[in-house]
Image (cartoon, helix red, strand yellow):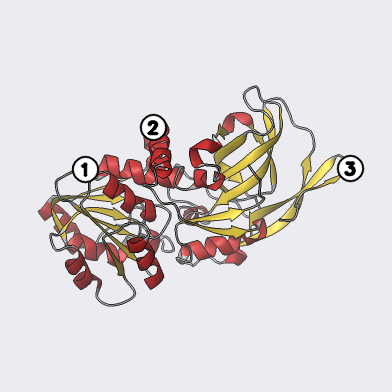
Amino acid sequence: MRNLVRPLHGMMIVQRVVLNSRPGKNGNPVAENFRIEEVNLPDNISEGQVQVRTLYLSVDPYMRCKMNEDTGTDYIAPWQLSQVADGGGIGVIEESKHANLTKGNFVTSFYWPWQTMVILDGNSLEKVDPQLVDGHLSYFLGAIGMPGLTSLIGIQEKGHIIAGSNQTMVVSGAAGACGSLAGQIGHLLGCSRVVGICGTHEKCLFLTSELGFDGAINYKKGNVAEKLQESCPAGIDVYFDNVGGDISDTVISQMNQNSHIILCGQISQYNKDVPYPPPLLPAIEAVLKERNITRERFLVLNYKDKFEPGIIQLSQWFKEGKLKIKETVINGLENMGAAFQSMMTGGNIGKQIVCVSEISL
């Protein structure tokens, strides 16, 4: 890829992506909500800072609420108009004035500015070991990062899987960053049957032929309720919910007594002005009560003490070939908006990643 950084008389010109416009609380985001621009980066860094070249950036469904003036949550701040956007990122240190970080270290952050080169406070970064991902650094933004931890810890904490007890798990948004991992982890932790719901024939085939799902349902074709009954004859014990809305109502209707919902995301509701988690229809709420189904909000950031063992477990499964990892990679910072729009409309299989610059390990 071309070099997007060029020096200029004691300054460095770098590219960044800013929020150009808001889609509105009930609007669908488009690539044009973002714009790319050039800015000057000082060529001197202060004590405790590092200068980092961005390698990979993540686009994720939760970012949709950052596009609103008010995110509706206290733990995510909104993006500001004409200001640089941010999210999960990984990069390589080019210069350091921080005691624990040196040139050549790979670092990651959940609040990485969308620009080609950044000056960051070293304390805000986490060093990562390329060996954990066999050199696939972008995996730290997906399977061996926040989506992986969300899937693993979510299932451990809220799924109540008991190995050998013949449980059936259903995953919605099953070909996405979390869903594609959640189904595999469900099997690894002891579910006897895992069924995924997604939106294309290609994705269904991917789930069953590559990821080991026992069944896959294309919600855009045919009757989802009927297909669920065929795929889950013994009912549903665990539901990993990434989408909410009608699909979730259909799944919940077929859940067993004392079953469990892992409330990971509600992407079908993100372009609507509703609270999170969105309220359920009275009839579905009644099903939850009658069958004693748990549906508690799950927020991975509440389980930071489990991150380190979680990453080690995910890395081990990956290295043993038990956890298959899929990414959809788009090249170029200028394509961040297009990558975001595509991810929000199901254009990706696995984790959606933008490669800003490459490095050979």
Q: Amino acid at mark 3?
A: His
Which residue is denoted by mark 2 in the rendering? 309
Residue 117 is situated, as x and y percent measured from the top left of the image, at 70, 44
Q: Of 166 and 67, which appears nearest the observer? A: 166
Q: Position of residue 308 (x, y in %)?
A: 42, 32
Task: Answer above or below: position of 311 versus 286.
Answer: above
Quadrant where the N terminus sits is: bottom right
Are dots 1 and 2 in contact, CB under 8 Å?
no
Left or right? Give the position of 152 relative to 69. Answer: left
Cα separation, mark 1 vs mark 2, equals 19 Å
- Disc 1 on helix, strand or loop? loop
On the question of residue 98 being in view, the answer is yes
CA distance separating discs 2 and 3: 47 Å
User: Residue 342 at what x, y percent from top left?
Assistant: 51, 65
Name the amino acid type tagged 2.
Pro
The outermost residue toward the bottom is 222
Pointer 1 or 2: first along the chain: 1
**Sequence order check: which comes first, mark 3 or mark 1?**
3
Q: Which residue is mark 3?
A: 9
Out of 109 and 107, give the one closest to the viewer. Answer: 107
Residues marked 3 and 1 touching at CB (< 8 Å): no
- For mark 1, what is the residue? 160
Quadrant of res 251 = bottom left
Q: Residues within 10 Å of mark 3 (few under 14, many from 20)?
A: few
Q: Secondary structure at mark 3?
A: loop
Q: Quadrant of the C terminus?
A: top right
Tag nearer the camera, 1 or 2: 2
Q: Nearer the viewer, mark 3 or mark 1?
A: 1
Residue 250 lies, in percent from the top left, at 23, 66
Residue drawn 32% across the image and 44% down it? 154
Image side of residue 95 versus residue 58, left or right: right
